[in-house]
Amino acid sequence: MPDPRARLLAEHRQRIAHEGTGIPPRWADLSDQDQRILTGEAEEWLRAAVEAGLAPLADRPTDKHDAVWLDDEGWLWGEYQTSPPSHGDAILRLVWESDECSSKRELEEQGVEFRLIGWSQ
């Protein structure tokens, strides 16, 4: 299964390649072949970044690992695995005074964007 971050990386790389040339072509306007080529290259670069330790794995390494997320405002969030799961996708904002759990999905529905930045154990 391809890394879900590859397309995002390919879209941004394509935009960067056309900076200063006027209006860059929109991703949706590229041919399917061009999108496949750019996504394939992005998958290779992303794999290299993971293997070099510059980016985390997209998938959980083991059941004992918890995800660490960075949202679009710079807040850190830690996955909170409970048994049985309270939300199924519970996360805690990593601040000392907060002990209240939130639903990641509900926050995303409110427009919060999360980026996986690593795994803790």
Image (spheres, rainbow, N blue to C red):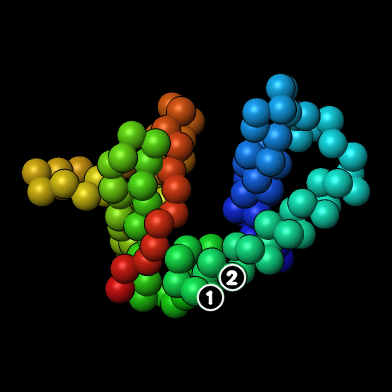
Crowdedness near tag 1: few (<14), some (14–19) or many (≥20) residues, C-alpha within 10 Å: few
Quarter placement of the N terminus = bottom right
Q: Amino acid at mark 2?
A: Ala
Q: Is residue 1 above or below residue 34?
A: below
- Determine the residue positioned at 45% across, 72% down: 53
The residue tagged with tag 2: helix, strand or loop? helix
Q: Is residue 56 above or below residue 14?
A: below
For the residues labelled 2 and 1, say whether their Cβ atoms are less than 8 Å apart: yes
* Residue 48 circle label: 2
Q: Amino acid at mark 1?
A: Glu
* Residue 72 placement: quadrant: top left
The reply, left or right, for residue 81 in relation to residue 7 is: left
Is any part of residue 77 visible from this angle?
A: yes
Q: Position of residue 51 (x, y in %)?
A: 53, 75
The residue tagged with tag 1: helix, strand or loop? helix
The reply, left or right, for residue 37 in relation to residue 68 is: right
The reply, left or right, for residue 22 in relation to residue 62 is: right
Q: Nearer the viewer, residue 33 or 65?
A: 33
- Determine the residue positioned at 21% across, 50% down: 94
Crowdedness near tag 2: few (<14), some (14–19) or many (≥20) residues, C-alpha within 10 Å: few
* Residue 51 circle label: 1
The reply, left or right, for residue 111 in relation to residue 92 is: right
* Residue 78 placement: quadrant: bottom left
Q: Position of residue 3 (x, y in %)?
A: 64, 60
